[in-house]
Amino acid sequence: MKLSRPVSWFLLAFGVWSWFIWITFVKNLVKDGSGLAFDDAGDPTAYFWVHLALAVTSFLLGTAIGVIGLRGVRALRREAAAPADEKSAT
């Protein structure tokens, strides 16, 4: 399958955005002082574990999507850099 340039860049940007957003969220989750993420004894609550699982899942999906986008961008650049005689042979 061949991805278009806009789709490749979108997927790459989505992967980067996902990492940025969820890293910020996890930092805020760990520093939570509202009592949602940690109980009075300082132990993690179910809220903490569920949101940590969401963050890890989003890291993995964001990475996979970003890698697909990166591979698409690289393939388009290789195709653009290929000599004209190689393009006509395919």
Image (cartoon, rainbow, N blue to C red):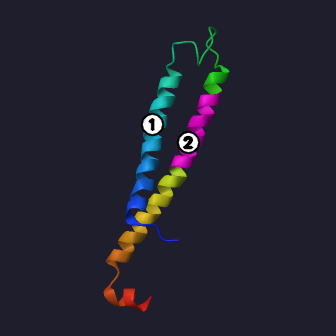
What residue appears at the point 52 percent right and 24 percent down from the top-left corner?
Answer: 29
The three-letter code of the residue at mark 2 reads: Ser
Is residue 75 shown left or right of residue 54?
A: left
Counting from the top left corner in percent of width and height, residue 28 is at 47, 24
Q: How many marks?
A: 2
Compared with 3, 13 (above or below) is above
Compared with 25, 83 (above or below) is below
Query: What residue did someone put label 1 on?
Result: 21
Q: CA distance from mark 1 to mark 2?
A: 10 Å
Q: Which structural element holds mark 2?
A: helix
Where's the C terminus, which quadrant?
A: bottom left
Q: Earlier in the sequence, mark 1 or mark 2?
A: 1
Label 1 crowd (10 A; few <14 / some 14-19 / many >=20): few
The three-letter code of the residue at mark 1 reads: Ile
Q: In the displayed image of the protein, which residue is found farthest to the top?
A: 40
What residue appears at the point 51 percent right and 13 percent down from the top-left corner?
Answer: 33
Residue 53 highlighted magenta (yes or no): yes
Label 2 crowd (10 A; few <14 / some 14-19 / many >=20): some
Residue 77 highlighted magenta (yes or no): no
- Report the magenta stretch's main SS: helix
Counting from the top left corner in percent of width and height, residue 54 is at 60, 36
Is residue 90 shown left or right of residue 81?
A: right
Q: Which structural element holds mark 1?
A: helix
Q: Quadrant of residue 75?
A: bottom left
What residue appears at the point 43 percent right and 39 percent down from the top-left corner?
Answer: 20
What residue appears at the point 39 percent right and 70 percent down from the top-left corner?
Answer: 76
Name the mark on residue 58: 2
Q: In this picture, which residue range is highlighted in magenta? A: 50-62
Q: Are the residues flagged by discs 1 and 2 in contact, CB closer than 8 Å?
A: yes
